């Protein structure tokens, strides 16, 4: 049974049993962003499979131990695995979009071609995912980073897919 949205003591849970990723806790090492930022159901794409939840939280903790900048966690999966045209690959909670790291630490978009893009830091975040999670593939258009492969519309985020 899903948790009640109006119960502040229980996290939001969908029918699959997936909990919503905590939304931008300050000491977590990450912040959230995504398609739902300007809509009433903010956080609507923030339902990870338990394997992805563990991966995000572990990578964020490991990252926080080496860098003060936070990782931008974007779209994961909609509640109940709802399908729409925006992110048809984000159905099982095992896919996440992550912003590249910016040199200035601002929590806004950056492309891999921008002067504020921090290639080394972004490569480190990808390496952390590969170290602490069962990564199937990473899509990102900066192919100078090991293991990544190109994909349309992946200049301003990388897409991590996990094995379930």
Image: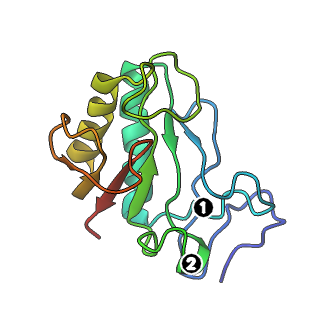
The residue indicated by pointer 1 is 20
Q: How is the image coloured?
A: rainbow
Residue under the point 77% across and 59% down:
39
Residue nearest the observer in this picture, 124 or 119: 119
Left or right placement of residue 1 versus residue 117 in this view: right
Q: Is residue 135 visible?
A: no
Left or right placement of residue 11 versus residue 148 in this view: right
Q: In the rendered structure, which disc, 2 or 1, sits on the residue that comes first in sequence?
A: 1
Where's the C terminus, which quadrant? bottom left
The residue indicated by pointer 2 is 84
Residue under the point 56% across and 78% down:
84
Identity of the residue furthest to the left in this view: 146
Question: Please, what secondary structure does the residue beneath circle 2 have?
Answer: loop
Q: Compared with residue 67, is residue 144 higher up or lower down, i.e. above or below?
A: below
Q: CA gap, disc 2 to disc 1?
A: 18 Å
Residue 81 location in percent, x, y? 53, 78
Residue nearest the observer in this picture, 163 or 138: 138
Q: Tell me the crowding category of disc 2: few under 14, some 14 to 19, or many 20 or more residues within 10 angstroms, Cα based.
A: few
Left or right placement of residue 12 versus residue 57 in this view: right
Question: Please, what secondary structure does the residue beneath circle 1 have?
Answer: loop
Residue 95 location in percent, x, y? 39, 62
Q: Tell me the crowding category of disc 1: few under 14, some 14 to 19, or many 20 or more residues within 10 angstroms, Cα based.
A: many
Q: How many marks?
A: 2
Residue under the point 61% across and 50% down:
22
Determine the image quadrant of residue 24. top right
Q: Is residue 113 visible?
A: yes
Judged by depth in the image, the label closer to the viewer, 2 or 1, is 2
Residue under the point 71% across and 62% down:
10
Determine the image quadrant of residue 114. top left
């Amino acid at each position: 049974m899903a948790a009640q949205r109006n119960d502040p003591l229980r996290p939001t849970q969908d029918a699959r049993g997936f909990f919503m990723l905590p939304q931008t806790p300050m000491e977590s090492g990450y912040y959230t962003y995504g398609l739902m930022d300007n809509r009433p159901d903010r956080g609507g794409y923030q339902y990870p499979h338990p394997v992805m939840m563990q991966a995000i939280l572990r990578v964020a903790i490991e990252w926080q131990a080496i860098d003060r900048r936070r990782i931008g966690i974007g779209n994961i999966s909609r509640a109940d695995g709802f399908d729409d045209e925006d992110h048809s690959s984000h159905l099982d909670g095992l896919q996440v979009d992550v912003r590249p790291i910016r040199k200035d630490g601002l929590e806004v978009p950056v492309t891999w071609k921008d002067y504020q893009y921090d290639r080394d830091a972004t490569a480190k975040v990808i390496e952390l995912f590969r170290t602490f999670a069962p990564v199937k593939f990473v899509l990102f258009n900066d192919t100078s980073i090991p293991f990544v492969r190109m994909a349309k519309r992946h200049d301003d985020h990388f897409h991590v897919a996990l094995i379930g």
